[in-house]
Amino acid sequence: MDLFLVGAACQGLAPIVRVIYQVIKIFMILIPIALIIFGTIDLGKAVIASDEKEVKAAQGRLIKRFVYAALVFFVPLLVSVVMDIVASGANGTDDWRSCWKCAKDENCENVDI
């Protein structure tokens, strides 16, 4: 990939795109971990309380949190794959694709021309 072309495609937006990519990456990791931890804590509290009704409710919340965690992790990945598939057939979309791929690449540091 030619760095000049990537820089021209980003037109000074490379630092912003890089920050957006890093924020999405952090959210994809931290939010599922937090949801699973909070669900486990809720279930632990219910088990310690020895209330069968509360244990069943906590199990339901834990399962929902697992599903939410999976969605938070996979939705950005799915959107990225779908956008790549859609953009592969469209004209004029190579600019933003190369800019987004440069945000993922650590060797594209100084491309904001």
Image (spheres, grey):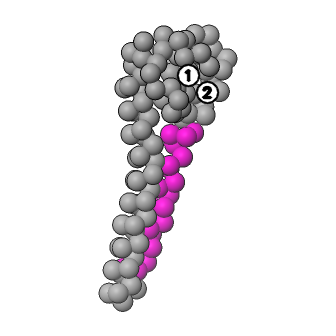
Q: Which residue is mark 1?
A: 97
Vertically, is 3 above or below 73? Answer: above
Left or right? Give the position of 92 relative to 45: right
Q: Which residue is mark 2?
A: 84
**Residue at (40, 46) in percent of width and height:** 27
**Residue at (44, 34) in percent of width and height:** 21
Q: Badge 1: how crowded within 10 Å, few (<14), some, or many (20+)?
A: some
Which sits in the foreground, 16 or 43? 16
Stretch of the chain drawn in magenta: 53-78
Report the amino acid beneath label 1. Arg
Where on the picture, by quarter, is residue 79? top right
Separation (CA) of disc 2 from disc 1: 8 Å
Left or right? Give the position of 83 relative to 40: right
CB within 8 Å, label 2 to label 1:
yes
**Residue at (48, 10) in percent of width and height:** 8
Q: Earlier in the sequence, mark 2 or mark 1?
A: 2
Query: Within the magenta stretch, is there residue 48?
Result: no
Q: Where does residue 56 sit, x and y in percent of width and height?
A: 43, 77
Whether residue 61 appears in this view of the structure is: no
Query: What main secondary structure does the magenta stretch of the protein show?
Result: helix
